[in-house]
Image (cartoon, rainbow, N blue to C red):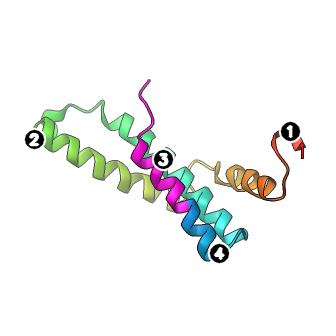
Amino acid sequence: MTAIDPLSTAAAAQAAQSAQARNGTGEAAQDEVAKGFETIFLTQLVDQMMKTVDSSAFGGDQQAEMWRSFMSEAIAEQLSDNGGLGFGGSVKQMIASYEQGIGPAGKR
């Protein structure tokens, strides 16, 4: 299993902070953070799938690495824009619970 890309994790944290700064802790901010989380997850998923493609199909190792990175991100954004995997709603619900001071299993 590969490690989570720290740049993607940092981007998610930055997206969450900027969403909260722009929109407060309202529903729009929760939507944006949930969608951002799902997009980052999908980027990692698609990137792992793309690694199974032979790099010679894209002009060699260096070109394939660059192309795969951009393509993975573009595919993930399209998937997320069209509903993603469907767990964005769960992420949004968890964010709302934490904002209300309710932790896992309904504990305060």
Q: Upstream in the sequence, badge 3 or badge 2?
A: 3
Residue indicated by mark 1 = 105
Q: In which quarter of the image is residue 33?
A: bottom right
Residue indicated by mark 2 = 59
Q: Which numbered tag is attached to residue 37?
A: none
For the point 84% across and 58% down, the residue is: 100
Q: Residues within 10 Å of mark 3 (few under 14, many from 20)?
A: some
Distance from Cα at disc 1 to Cα at disc 4? 27 Å
Residue indicated by mark 3 = 9
Q: Upstream in the sequence, badge 2 or badge 1?
A: 2
Residue indicated by mark 4 = 23
The percent coordinates of residue 84 (x first, y second) are 55, 53
Q: Upstream in the sequence, badge 2 or badge 4?
A: 4
For the point 59% across and 65% down, the residue is: 32
Distance from Cα at disc 2 to Cα at disc 4? 44 Å
The percent coordinates of residue 13 (x first, y second) are 53, 54
For the point 57% across and 58% down, the residue is: 35
Q: Which structural element holds mark 4?
A: helix
Q: Which structural element holds mark 3?
A: helix
Residue 74, placed above or below residue 22: above
Image depth: mark 3 or mark 2 in front? 3
Q: Which structural element holds mark 2?
A: loop
Q: What residue type is labelled 1?
A: Ala
Q: Which amino acid does label 2 sit on?
A: Gly
Q: Upstream in the sequence, badge 3 or badge 1?
A: 3
Q: What residue type is labelled 3?
A: Thr
Instruction: Judge from the rendering whether residue 10 lies leftward or rightward of residue 26; answer left or right.
Output: left
Q: Give the range drawn in magenta.
A: 1-15
Q: Residues within 10 Å of mark 4 (few under 14, many from 20)?
A: some
Q: Which structural element holds mark 1?
A: helix
Residue situated furthest left in the rendering? 59
